[in-house]
Amino acid sequence: MIDFKAAFRSWSRLGAVLGLAMAPLAAPAQADTVRVTVSYYSAATGPFFEKMAAEFAKANPGHEVKIEVVNWNALFQKLQTDISGNANSDISIIGTRWLLDFVRDDLVEPLDGYMNADFRNRFIGTFLNPSQIKAKTYGLPIAASARGLYYNKAMLTAAGFPTGPKTWDEVVAAAEKIKAAGGNGFGVQGKGTEVDVYLYYALWSYGGTVVSPDIKAAFNSPAGVKALTLYKSIVDRGLSQPGVTDYDRTDLQNLFKQGRLGMVITAPFLINQIAKEVPTLEYGIAPVPTGTTNATYAVTDSVVMFKNSKVKATAWKFLDFLFTAGPRIEFTKAEGFLPTTKAEAADPYFTGNERLQTFVNLLPNAHFAPTVTGWEDTAKAVTNAAQSVYLGSATPEAALKKAETEANAALGK
């Protein structure tokens, strides 16, 4: 189990506040320097934050912001290593699903004392809520998205579904036609971040849930078995791309952009990529296919301030600047995310963007990752289960039963 608490137990025994007593082990940042760790979303990420750092420094003489960009797949481990060595930045983007573990181990600063009513009112409540734990706000929603089904219009029209499939049965029927024509039908993610979420799309659509209200694994259910059996059938019958465990989300998106994949479930940011890289590609976006109900996945990434920061006042000032209208609109447009603030949502770019509105319309049926400790270990257990089924080394029933045991050893701990 990934356990931040074990990494910091020695600090607690020393009575230190997140390593202040260990400061000699790492070179302290200058009092006027804010270090920021950001996750790589696209080629636009680094330049945006560097620009914001320069603008902030110009407006605030004597203060400096240093930006470090880290790939998503390495971010969690990077933060874990830096924190355990008391070498972490002052501010970092994190997956909101990690937040409870950070709060449990007393690593992040509650932000309510820095926020006035006007600042709080900037946000769309749906996206601020996941960063709130026990009535305290520990993060700000820097990025938000939902998931929809992208489909190649030419391939799906030839298969008999010109407006995209509506149900999983239609996905299978369309994939069969696409395979018969020599193409790859429905992309199945089998590697990297969110392999588990790709399975949850079907699980939720069949009325299932991932974690029960009493914080126990709930995915080993009839809905879970049906979802994994569906994916196994798609893989075994060659209705997906070959070698699914070699494909992460980026790989699937690239196949789709190349016109070599009929359908893929992914986030709004693919819209920007297609517009830039393959503007002639004809495609549509539909809701996640229905089993017995409508469902999608909504996710936020949060920016947090670490408790051991020595420059909290300046760090907060930079956060306040990042969440003004200009920077927010520029960032969200460039990355292809959904608005998290009211100023973004009111901008003509978003109100007039029909494809982005498709994702907004899915939000009433959205599931967020549950705010529970042990979520990352649960995701890993489900990922391993899905991969074992795709590789033919386990049945859906056996794989989910094993994952259930592993998840329950971590959840709520």
Image: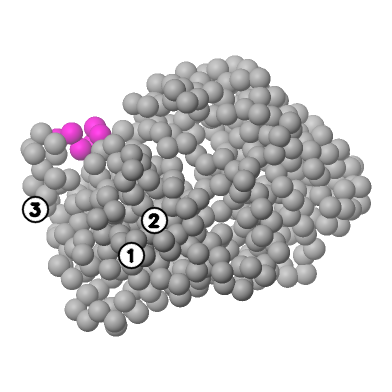
Residue placed farthest to the front in the image? 117
Amino acid carrying label 1: it is Leu
Q: Earlier in the sequence, mark 1 or mark 3?
A: 3
Magenta residue span: 4-10
User: Do we see residue 138 in this rendering?
Assistant: yes
Question: Image height check: is 303 above or below 176?
Answer: below
**Image spot of residue 73 (x, y percent):** 46, 48
- Separation of residues labelled 3 and 2 (CA atoms): 31 Å
Residue at x-position 56% and y-position 40%: 367
Asked whether the residues under the numbered discs 2 and 1 touch, taking CB atoms below 8 Å apart as contact, a structural biologist would say: yes
Residue 348: give x, y in percent of width and height. 61, 73
Task: Judge the density around disc 1: few (<14), some (14-19), many (≥20) Cα neighbours within 10 Å.
Answer: some
For discs 3 and 2, the disc positioned in front in the rendered view: 2
Answer left or right for 351 relative to 313.
right
The quarter of the picture where the N terminus appears is top left
Residue at the (14%, 39%) spot, across then down:
11
Point out the tag, 2 or 1, that comes first from the N-terminus. Answer: 2
Badge 3: few (under 14), some or many (20 or more) residues near its Cα, within 10 Å? few
Q: Residue 39: where, in percent of width, then height?
A: 43, 57
Instruction: Name the magenta segment's main secondary structure.
Output: helix
Residue that mark 2 sits on: 140
Quadrant for the C terminus in the image? top left
Residue 377 vs residue 26, the one in the foreground: 377
